[in-house]
Structure formats: C-alpha cells, structure tokens
Image (cartoon, rainbow, N blue to C red):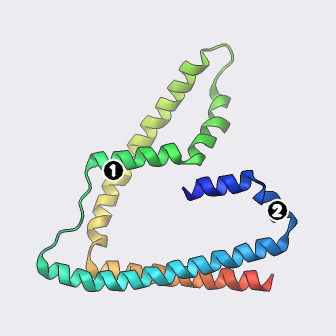
Amino acid sequence: MGALLWAALVGFGLAAILEQSAEVFRWIKIAGGIYLLYLGVSSFLKARKAAKAGLAAAHDGAQPLVYSKRAGFGAGMISTLLNPKVGLFYLAVVPQFIPRGVNTLAMAMVLGLTLAVIGFLYLTVIAFVANRAMKWLRKPKVNSMIERISSAILGVLGVGVMVSGAAS
C-alpha cells in the first residue's frame, strides 16, 4: 500500500517538486530519519516486551505460530502481483526477447513460464535454507541479540539521516 501511495505522489508531481526545492527534500529527509528512529526504538521496546512474554509463554508450553504452505503461497503470489518492479521488468526486458513475426502472446507466455520455473526452483532452495535458519533464529538468545542489533542500527540510521538533513 505504501508503494502505491508513493507512486501516486510521484504521479501528482512530487518528484518534480523535490527536484526544484532542496528545502522540501531536506524536510522529507528529516522526517524519514525521525521515522527510522521511531522504528528502531519501537522495535527495541517490542522485542523487550516479547522477550518477557516469551519467557512466560515458554513456561506455559506455548508453541510458535505455524503457517500453512497454502498461506505462504498466497502471500508470495500477492506480493508478486503487487510488486511494481516485477511489472516493470516484464515491460522493459521481456519484449526484447520476442522475435518479430512470431505470436507475441505465445512467446511472452513461454518466456514468462521460463522465468516462473527458474524463480520457483530458486525460491524452493531459499525456502529450505530459510527453514534451517529459522530453527536457529528461534533460539531465544539469538533472537534477542538480533532484535537489539537491528533496533540499534535503525536508531543510528535515523539519527544519521536527521543530522544530514539538518546540515543540508
């Protein structure tokens, strides 16, 4: 949804305004820095709260959420359909590989199927690797360390963007 909002803003001329006004761009950078700082702080606070709740849940025998393969497939499909980069890729690259004089629809479908099969095989390998990684990442000590590090990185990025925006 956020990508659609940005696309609409660009469509209404935000890019042209940013190109002409360094001041507007500076304030957008500062707002972005504040947002990154907010994400870092809220992520850190949520991680602390979840860690406390996780300790209580561990004593209660609660299991982590499990998602079905169908739900994962659906989420991936929606993500691909709503990803403008995928559409731009097909619009910009695929036509170059369609020879003149052939059935354009059929050739585009063959190329699309080829890309889909390659993507499916690649993502299947990624899914198996991710499954192994999730087993490791679910360890409370690892999870806590990652949450703290990522929260700190977001906070530092937020401060850096605010400072660079204020110095502009």
- Structural distance between the alpha carbons of marks 2 and 1: 40 Å
Q: What kind of element bears circle 2?
A: helix
Residue occupying the point 32% across, 65% down? 133
Q: From the image, which quarter does the C terminus lie in? A: bottom right
Q: Which residue is mark 1?
A: 72
Residue 17: mark in rendering: 2
**Quarter of the figure with residue 106:** top right
> At which x and y percent is residue 73?
35, 45
The x, y position of residue 129, in whole percent, is 33, 57
User: Toward which corner of the image does residue 143 lie, by quadrant?
Assistant: bottom left
Residue drawn 32% across the image and 79% down it: 142
Quadrant into which the N terminus falls: bottom right
Q: Secondary structure at mark 1?
A: helix
Quarter of image, res 164: bottom right
**In the image, 162: left or right of 2?**
right
Of residues 70 and 10, the one nearer the viewer is 10
| Residue shown at 66% from the left, 77% from the top | 31
Residue type highlighted by circle 1: Gly
Residue 127 in the image, given as x and y percentages of width and height: 34, 53
Q: Nearer the viewer, residue 121 or 143?
A: 143
Question: Looking at the image, is 148 positioned above or below residue 79?
Answer: below
- Callout 2 touching callout 1 (CB < 8 Å): no
Residue type (three-letter) at the residue carrying disc 2: Ile
Viewer-side label of 2, 1:
2
Foreground: 65 or 138?
65
Considering only vertical position in the picture, is 11 above or below 55? Answer: above
149 to the left or right of 51: right
Count neighbours of disc 2 (C-alpha within 10 A) and say few if under 14, some if 14 to 19, many if 20 or more: few
